[in-house]
Image: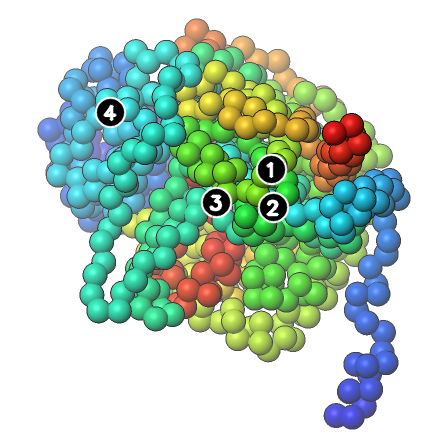
Amino acid sequence: MQTIIEELEGRFKATPLAISVPGKNQKAVYLKTGEKSVPEIMLLLEGKGVILADLFAAENFTGEKFSLFYIFEKRGDPVMMVLVVGIDEAKAASVAAHFPGACYYEREVADGFGIEFTRAFDKRRLFLHEVYPEGFHPLLKSFENKPLDIDYSKLVKEYPFRKCSGEGIYQIPVGPVHAGVIEPGHFRFHAIGETIFNLEIRHFYTHRGLEKLAEGKTPLECCAVAESVSGDESAANVTALTMAVEEICGIKVPLRAWCIRTILLELERVYSHLGDLAGMAIDVAFPLGAAAFFNMREETLRQNGALTGSRFSKGIIVPGGLNRDIAQSKLGGLQAYTNDFVARLEKAVADINASGWVIDRFETTGTIDKALAAPLNLSGPVARASGVQVDTRIDHPYGIYEKLRVEEYPREGGDVLARFLVKADEIKNSIRLIQDVLDQTGGGPVFEKYEAIEGYAMSMVEAARGQNLHWLWLKNGRVERYKVRTASFCNWPVIEHAVVGNIVADFPVINKSLNLSYAGNDL
Amino acid sequence: MISEVFKNVFGKKKTSAVKPQDLSFQKLGLQLKEDIDGVFGRSLAVRELDSGSDNAAEIEVNNLAAPYYDAERFGITFVASPRHADVILITGAITLNMAAAVKKTFDAMPQPGLVMAVGDDACDGGILKGTYAVLGGADRMLHVDVKIPGNPPSPEEIMAGLVTLMAQIKMKTRTG
């Protein structure tokens, strides 16, 4: 990455803005450049094999009206590059031809700020559904956040789905309200007989305007916003937010606070993955196999409740550390609980492995090609089950992760079975991490005073579903812009590839094996 | 082979390993079962509807149906369609993007349809109150019979909410 940065500085006169360093492993180098050189730079970057990790906009960041932030990552390199492109008019060139993942981001920026991307091959709306009026762009500073007076009951025009036609092709619209107890989202299938020929997803039903909601809040008030990005990623998202705040004001969080944060982060991974394992077994009609995972998940949620008072670890992690300490006796209780956990899990997984018909449903179902990982920036267990070694805890360690033994369990299959086994292995690793951290957790304070006034910072965490990237900009002690990009946002489009050629009846288990968050995607 | 069959028929079943737990939950459940038997005749059909929540409340509703709580033993069934439902558990503030779907779902219920708001956001909009993207709590669109606050409420609290709901219905049937 360093050589690429130097080349951009030399050839395109890109000027360094600032270096933000959330610990030496999440170093982000900001380069500013004019919009004219963007096409050439993108061509060059595409050739260098970098990955587009995020793309968003902010208003009045530099001299120009809008700034577009392109964040690039080179796998295995700790340095991230943030390319800041200033534009005066609400118009920019699409980079989706070089980085296909950009398509989703550009539609998001177009909705939020009204920036038009020329030569984009998909200009449909993304998070603003048809109910929103034309010309409404909520993230513009000129829009004051207030309820809109809209008649939602009026039939509005329909979303233009991709069209498929031909002999024997028929459509199956599914959602937003599903048969199970899950979040809302729409899936438009085109099938030939039982086989899925094409799938298009249409989400953002749970769009709650969280990025706009965060604006004007103090970092502490913003914690509740981060926690509601996705309920089962509360600890991960609030940790990412606090890491950004802590970097802006340059404080060091006490060791004990980081130990407890790490325990909560890993517990979150454990209960999230356990729910996935249970869900996959349920979706192939094996409730007996699922029962053990369900029970262990309930116990894990209760551990969370005993430690923090919230079964989802909400309301304890704050900028500067934790807002209250957890008694040593409660940590001891967790330690005792973990003693026979791995053995019980292995028994439950062995029961699944011994059921030939379950394996038959899992194997070769919903295969995700490794080649999709880089262009779509796949991360988390979804990527690792397709043979891609990527884990933010290893690539860009934060907090105390550098000193811990985070292990990767890559599998090549890319199918439901591979994702099942990767998640099972990761639970075991998380339990081991929790035990290691419990051994190391000493006494001491859990909070460091901070004063966050001005500045901006990026931070990354590995949530249960993969890498979540947060970018925070503070002005006069208040949030000026808060951008959250969850792993779900990057991983959702891959389901359109994973299901093709599978039968419609296998869709639920494929969806569950990915277990992406709708709320975390829709914000 | 034959010994395998004998073992399957007469041997200890795997489910027997689950211990009964949570006496307070058990008590709530039995109370609910009694009320359901009295008013609805054996079963209360529940439909979950996410109108824009952060997914924590759905997880808790899901947990009610999972083996640890197994609420179905008290006569609650989680049904796949609003057409089969007596009560809707609505989670999350109603987003503009979901508004039309929420209305359609409620209209598809056999009337009178009961509504229970689960979680702070569903009760009054919670932290989302006043943003452009939400209408507000569930009562901005539907008549809400019971509100269960919490971020999110625990399975036991949701169960207690159902007991309250049944008590309300009993009162109504007695007076009306």
Indicate the amino acid at tag 1: Gly
Residue B81 x, y percent position in the rendering: 54, 50
Q: Which residue is mark 1?
A: B113
Q: Which residue is mark 3?
A: A177
Badge 1 element: loop
Q: CA distance from mark 4 to mark 3?
A: 26 Å
Q: Quadrant of the N terminus of chain B?
A: bottom right
Residue that appears at 47% across and 34% down: B103
Q: Which residue is mark 4?
A: A134
* Labels 2, 4: one chain: no
> In front of the other: label 2 or label 3?
2
Residue B22 x, y percent position in the rendering: 85, 45
Residue A62 x, y percent position in the rendering: 26, 15
Quarter of the figure with residue A402: top right
Q: CA distance from mark 2 to mark 1?
A: 8 Å
User: Of marks 2 and 1, which one's residue comes earlier in the chain?
Assistant: 2
Q: Which residue is mark 2?
A: B85
Q: CA distance from mark 4 to mark 1?
A: 35 Å
* Labels 2, 1: one chain: yes
Residue that appears at 82% across and 59% down: B18
Quarter of the figure with residue A256: top right
